[in-house]
Amino acid sequence: MNKAKTDQESTNKNQENLRYLSLFGGKRGWERNPLSYSPRDDGVHIQNSNDEWEWWYFDFSFNNGYKAVATLHYHNIFLIPHLPTMQLFVYPPGEEPKAKLWAVRPGQENYAAQDHCLVRMGDLSAEYTSEGYKLKMLMGDLGVDLIIRNTLPGWKAGSGRLWTDGQLETGWVVPVPRGEVEGILVLNGIEHDVTGWAYHDHNWGNFELEKRFWGWYWGRIFDPKFTMIYGWVIPNKHDSPIVSPFFLGRGNEIILGTDQIQVEIEETKKDEQYGWDIPMRVRIRCQGEGIDVDGVLETERTVETLKLPRGDHFYHYYRFLASYQAKIMVDGQQDNLSGETLHEFMLLE
């Protein structure tokens, strides 16, 4: 009887572990030059239900030194019920961030297409067109009106599903691993012409993330030659597999998509506001056939600290400005990288 119970528990555990390996069908994956992404992957995935959530995320590094992050929360995971909201953060160099947080008002449109990215929320919108991605978020005296053109193809790690049991799922795709951006940044009511680099990803799900995950670390590097994106999504049970999508691009070519990486938080500091340990030094390693990556992010300052309501508890979100250094070996050729980037930490407890 005890053996039967133990065997059943072991079977259940193995089945649960496979759900954390949904990116590559229950095993770790390694794809050189993957091209499985399609525009449909950036369409809406959920039904119009308060049990489900979805967002489209964009961030920008402008050549004038400003950075910006824009999010269209078709159904906002951080609110119960999941109300539709929009967020825009602008980070002027050496100054305090500027932010606008809006919600769709009664009677306003909240629409997302299924076959490609077309999101309309009130007067704000994101749309994939033959000219590129058009993002229009004019929010009073703060806003952006931009067009983004991919310099790298869209990408998803394997299936794009970070966890699924066949009915419940959460997913993540990267329609713009890197793109050129131009348009208008509105700051204090004044329009500024801007150019620079852009990134866009897309998340969705139909269950409460904290039931499966403790939190995640995420970041990317835009170097003149290479583009690197990593996720380190940690289950709330320590003996379950960590979900670890990783992207490496060179020039306008995707070199690698995998979940075979290691992320180590080598140094932390106590956040004085909420008491959590936040990452000050993050190391990303990826080694496999023809590839050897060793990258380090050193946090320079915390640019965003958010306590996000979630039912009877809170999520905690941190965004950091960091310097990076990396050694990348591709098929015997080594390059050394350095520069500045954004990374983040989300705690679901």
Image: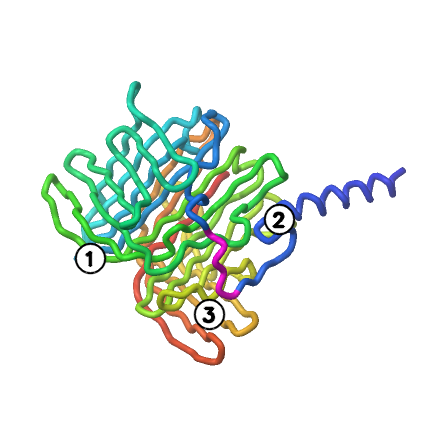
**At 63% from the left edge and 39% from the top edge, which residue is drawn?**
165
Relative placement, left or right, of 328 versus 304 is right
The reply to whether callout 3 and callout 2 are in contact (CB within 8 Å) is no
Judging by the rendered image, the residue that carries numbered circle 1 is 65
- Establish if 46 lies above or below 277: above
Local packing at callout 1 (Cα closer than 10 Å; few below 14, some 14-19, many 20+) is few
Judging by the rendered image, the residue that carries numbered circle 2 is 238
Amino acid residing under circle 2:
His
Of label 2 and label 1, which has the lower sequence position?
Answer: 1
* Position of residue 118 measured from the top left corner of the image (x, y, whole percent): 34, 38
Task: Give the farthest residue toward the front.
Answer: 130
Q: Quadrant of residue 9?
A: top right
Predominant secondary structure in magenta? loop
Q: Quadrant of residue 27?
A: bottom right
- Asked whether 215 or 225 is in front, the reply is 225
**At 66% from the left edge and 48% from the top edge, which residue is drawn?**
18
The total number of labels drawn is: 3
**At 24% from the left edge and 52% from the top edge, which residue is drawn?**
67
- Asked whether 14 or 251 is in front, the reply is 251
User: Start and end of the magenta stretch?
Assistant: 32-37
Of label 3 and label 1, which has the lower sequence position?
Answer: 1
Disc number lying in front (3 or 2): 3
Q: CA distance from mark 3 to mark 2?
A: 25 Å
Q: Secondary structure at mark 2?
A: loop
* Position of residue 40 measured from the top left corner of the image (x, y, whole percent): 44, 43
Label ID, residue 168: none
- Asked whether 342 or 29 is in front, the reply is 29
Of label 3 and label 2, which has the lower sequence position?
Answer: 2
Q: CA distance from mark 3 to mark 1?
A: 27 Å
Disc number lying in front (2 or 1): 1
- Asked whether 60 or 48 is in front, the reply is 48
Q: Secondary structure at mark 1?
A: loop
